[in-house]
Amino acid sequence: MAERSLRGMSIGAKSLESDENVDFAARKEVTYICSDGHRTIVPFSEDAEVPKGWQCRCGKLASLEESNDEVADVLEPGKPQRTHWDMLTERRTEKELEELLAKRLKMHAEGWFPDYE
């Protein structure tokens, strides 16, 4: 009998509350278009300040559909993202990297592995 009383909904799976008598915040949908023609629709609160630019799913910057302004003029240019290769070349030259690679390939071919004990 005790097992039967534990059956039911999973905890956190669904809410038992309804949306009755709930006033949701007023929203507006703003459309952004990137240079590739992708349209992105973003919901904002009615009283929120809408940004003139938005990052598209393709990674490019999109501008408001209604405006003819270029996004580059609106948004501040950020720092370019550093890749692993950029950080590696800051520490070593390509010649050093080639020497290190040759050394590691030789160690691998000879079956030498460091002892981590």
Image (cartoon, rainbow, N blue to C red):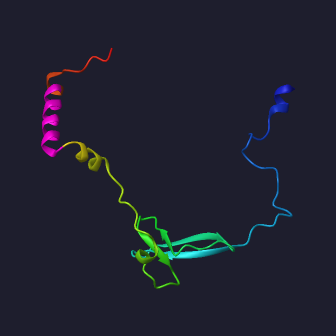
Which is nearer the eye, 29 or 12? 29
Which is nearer the eye, 97 or 31? 97
Vertically, is 48 above or below 107?
below
Q: Pinpoint residue 82: horizontal percent, then vertical percent.
A: 33, 53
Q: Main secondary structure of the magenta part?
A: helix
Q: Pinpoint residue 115: horizontal percent, then vertical percent.
A: 27, 16
Please identify the quarter of the rendering in which residue 22 is found. bottom right
Q: Is 96 covered by the magenta stretch? A: yes
Vertically, is 73 above or below 113?
below
Q: Pinpoint residue 20: horizontal percent, then vertical percent.
A: 85, 62
Q: Which residue shows up at 51% across the image and 81% down it?
A: 65
Magenta segment, which residues? 93-107
Q: Quadrant of the C terminus?
A: top left
- Left of 55 or right of it: where is 15? right
Q: Pinpoint residue 94: horizontal percent, then vertical percent.
A: 15, 45
Count of numbered badges drawn on the protein: 0
Q: Quadrant of the N terminus?
A: top right
Which is nearer the eye, 88 or 117? 88
Q: Which residue shows up at 64% across the image and 70% down it?
A: 44
- Left of 86 or right of it: where is 41? right
Please identify the quarter of the rendering in which residue 96 is found. top left
